[in-house]
Structure formats: structure tokens, C-alpha cells
Image: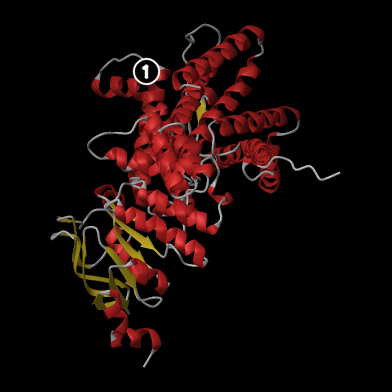
Amino acid sequence: MRNATFWLLAGAVGLAVVLLTRVFFTNEYFFFAAYVVLQYIVLSTAWNILGGYTGYTNFGTGAFFAMGAYSSAVLHKLPDLLQSTFDLTIPAIPLPVMIVVGGIVSGIVGLGTGYLTLRLRGVFFAIATLALAIVVQTLIVNWDYVGGSRGIYIIRPANAPLGGGYIQYLYTLMMVLSVVAVGIARTIERSRLGLGFAAIRDDELAAEAAGVPTLRLKLIATTLSGALMGMAGAPLPYYVTYLDPTSSFNLAYAVNSVAMPVIGGMTSWIGPVLGAILLGTIQQLATVTISSALNLLIVGLLLIGFVIIAPNGIIGLVRARQRKRAMAVEALSERPVERPAQ
Amino acid sequence: MSEHPILAVNGLGKRFGGFVALENIELTVAAGERLGLIGPNGSGKSTLVNCLCGTLHNETGSITFDGRPLAGLIAHQRTRLGLARSFQLPKPFHTLSLVDNLRVPLLYTVNSRAGHHLHGSEVDARCHELLRQVGLGDKARRLPRDLTQVEMRKLELARAVATRPRLLFADEAMAGLSPSEIEEILAVLFRLNEEGITIVLIEHIMRAVMSFSTRLAVLVAGHKIADGLPQDVVRNPEVEKAYLGE
């Protein structure tokens, strides 16, 4: 499928799902739950650009995500601040602008983190990203303007654009972000950039020897991945209406955005999408029917199961079957079946 | 042989902590030459290749490739200048098919140079041509894990050759292969040399080195102790001492 066709198709699917759900579901809770699943599609797709394509495991998803959320909180308070200090009146900043700003902020942090940590490989890189999450959380906890450790209340605008309630609006925005994230991931996968990422993942020295500028490519990956995570986090203050460091830096974001691509399959854009839909939906169902405390247990058990049975995820299972079939066909065509003499 | 050397190494030195891996290495390679680089295990052959290709950083000395100093250039930039290598232990891109393995150097090295850029179908055609040249034409869609050891070496060479190098370091491309497989790899290397690629062969298998090289350089414990015609070098008493003891 050509790239433009894919973008059109992804956009059409996103639009159709939004329209159908908004027509057929009247219960607000559906949108609350679906928002989370969509948010995880963005997060796991973003994680996979660095983790799956280039092979660098990032445990700092929470930091990039919360940075997006907190940049929205700052922008939310900005009109008041300008009013009180400079007597300057500006209108409330619309959420799509906040999403872009959140993306830029987290993208820049991604670039900086990449520059500082990409000399590290494997588990050392993972530890460095975990440390990043703690450093950023400490900064936020000590920043009074955004509520410090107390947290901050965000009052949603009275009217939601695009008709319907505010949660439907958030849900629609997150659908747009999902389509954008998945579109970017697939575009990368089929491009020269994606090939370079794969070469880095498989062997960095060999990639350099083949002419791949590995540092530059890794910085592109951390920046893009960070930016998309920040964009996923930007609407969070309006979703929860009360933003605090403990919940916005929750380790669950990091764990889920690693687990979802692993379960779905890390080498393809569809893997994180499948993983996020599967795991996200199970978690939402479990939250309603059993208990929200069960979520991480479910993730853990599924993760163990997949690592044992299907280490390359759902996609890996499908690919292995395709490969086996292709090899069988090839073997048949190479060697005509010899009939034993009767 | 042309008058200007394609590679000139002057006073190159490399240390790992207190261990001197290479000291004051002087080496020139003429364009079109087939140089054999030999030496006992741990004598610094691979370290020298790593320094020349930019994988390691040499503390002292200078490297000039085709009249251009290489100081400060990192590995991929040197590859783009025309300096290619194969690795001692093959390092294929194991999740990519053989075609895609070769696509990487074509897109990132050949297409990053000035001049004609290969487009979609040309890249495909060139990948298949390279695979055919090393006898892997019918395995284009396979993954590296389906290959035998000798095929893996050929893929390694093909990937280095795909960068359109002017100078190729073949780092123990034949270790662990059977005599007939060694002949196969040698044939590939001879053909590449005829096409104008200067080749430095780092090798332990003396029969292969002697039949391939037009000149031989010997490294022992980080020093170059001999350099000259192969038949002279192997009779050199110092070389004999290094290999056989006193």
C-alpha cells in the first residue's frame, strides 16, 4: 500500500470510528474508557519508534507524558498570570495548541536526553531513562506554580468544540493523535529512516560501517518518540481535571508502553496498536468489573505469557507462520516430488 | 601501481589504558594493491583496522586516505569516503532480509555521495546483482539466520562492497572455513580487486594470504616488524621468530 493511501485510510477509519461511536454510544463512560485506550495507542506507538525500531528501551515514558501534561497546565494558567503581572489580556489557549506545545517541549527533552544518554546501550540506557523520570518528577514536585506535590485543579471550558460533551471532544482529539502517531510510525517503517533504525537495532557497529549516521538517527528517534508522548500527555489535565505528580508520572505509563509493543510485536507499526487495543481494553474492563488494582497484574501475567510463548508478539506469530509457508512452497518448487518406483 | 598511495598511515598509536596495542605504525597502501596483513593473535591487526575505519580512536599519528586526512571523521563518514570493511565475526542485520541488508549501504552510503542517486528499482536491481556476484542470488528474500557460515561471510563482503569502496579491509573473512570455501572467498576477492578495489586482507590462513597478496606486512605486539614481498617477508628471521619462537 502506498503511503498516501495509508494516511487516507487511517484518517477514514479514525473518522468513521469517531462518528459511529458518537452516534451510537450515549454513555459518557464509554468515552472515558476509550480515551485511555487511544492514549495508549499513541504512547505505545511513540515508545516503539525508539524501542522497537532502534532497539533502545525507554522506561521514561512517564516523564515525557507528564511533561506534555504539565506544559498544558502552565499554558492553562498563562492567561491569568499575564493578567495579574502585566495586565495583559489574552484568550484561553485552545487545547490543540497545547498539544503542539506539549509535543515540542517533550521533543526537546527527548533530544537532550538522547544526546546525554545514547552513548549507553541496553540496560544502561534503560536505567538512565528511568532516572530521567525521577529527575523530572522531582522538578515538578518542587515547582509551586504548577501545584507542586499538592497538584493543580484544571477547570474545563464550559463549552466543548465539535458539539457533545467535553469528554467526547477529548476522545476525538486523541483519535486524531492516534491516527497521526500510527501514520508517522508506518511512514518511518517503510522509509530510508526506518531501514537505518533497523540497522542500528540489529548491529550498531555494522550500521556505522554501512554508512548509517547512527547518532543522528538515534536523536531523531528520541525526539520523535518524546514529542509524540508529550502530545499524548497534553490533554491529560482536562481529562482528569486534577493533575498531580504521583498520578501523572505513574509507572503504569512506562510499564504499559513497554508491554503493549512487546505483546503486539515491535518490528511493525501494527504491533503497538494491537497491543494497546488488547491490553488497554482488558484493563478498562477489569477496572469496571473487578478492580483497578488488578491492572498491573494483568499486564505482568500477559507479558510473562507472551515472552514465553510468543517472544516476538502477535505479529511475530503471524510472520513466523507466513515464513514457514513461504519456505514450504519454495522447497516444493525447488525439488519436484520424486515418486518411488512401484 | 599508481604513484600516490591510497592510504598512508604515519606514526599511529593506540593504547587501552596502560596496554599499548599499537605503536608508531607506518603503513602505505598503493591504489589497486592486494596487501596481506598478518600477525599472531593479539598483535593488533583488528585494532589497526578499527582505528583506520573510525570504530576506535587513535591517540597518536595520522591517517591519510586518498590525500585526505581522516582525523575527526567518524566511521560512517569514512565509509562514505570509500573505505569499507568486513567484520571478523559477521555482523549481519539479522532482522532484515538479504536484500535489505544490502539496501542499507546503498541508501546510506552510495546515495549520500554526490552524483547519480539510485532510485527504487535501481536499488533493487543493484542489491540482486551484488547478491548474484557472491552466489547468494537465490536467497535474496531469506534472513541471515538461514545462511551457512560461508554464506554469511559472503554477505558480509557483499555488504562492504555495496558501499562502492575504493579500499576494502577484509578482516579474517576466511577464518573457520574449509579449503574449498576459502577458494570461493578468494575468488570473490580477486574479482573485486580486478574491478579496481584496493584490498587489505587480514588473515591467519597463510596459504590464502600467500596466494592473494602482492605485498605482506607483519604486526607483532603492536609493532610492524616487516613489510615487503610475501616470499621475502616469510623468510625474514624476525617473522619466523614471532611465529615459531626462538
Name the side, left or right, on which A96 lies relative to A315: left
Three-letter residue code for mark 1 = Ile
* Residue situated in front as seen by the camera: A141 or B226: B226
Q: Is residue B21 visible?
A: no
Specify the quadrant of the image occupied by residue B10: bottom left
Q: Position of residue A49 (x, y in %)?
A: 47, 37
Kindly state the secondary structure of the residue where label 1 is placed: loop
For this orientation, the residue located farthest to the bottom is B246
* Residue situated in front as seen by the camera: A209 or B29: B29
| Relative height, residue A310 to residue A84 (above, below) | below
Q: Is residue B139 visible?
A: yes
Q: Position of residue B177 (x, y in %)?
A: 51, 65
Q: Position of residue A156 (x, y in %)?
A: 48, 17
Give the residue at x 53% y 45%. B95
* Chain that bears disc 1: A
Give the residue at x 21% y 55%. B72
Residue at the disc numbered 1 = A93
* Residue situated in front as seen by the camera: A109 or B58: B58
Give the residue at x 37% y 32%. B122
| Relative height, residue A180 to residue A308 (above, below) | above
Q: Quadrant of the C terminus of chain A?
A: top right
For this orientation, the residue located farthest to the front is A341
| Relative height, residue A161 to residue A299 (above, below) | above
Give the residue at x 30% y 58%. B53
* Residue situated in front as seen by the camera: A129 or B114: B114
Specify the quadrant of the image occupied by residue B226: bottom left
Q: Residues within 10 Å of mark 1 (few under 14, many from 20)?
A: some
Q: Position of residue B205 (x, y in %)?
A: 43, 72
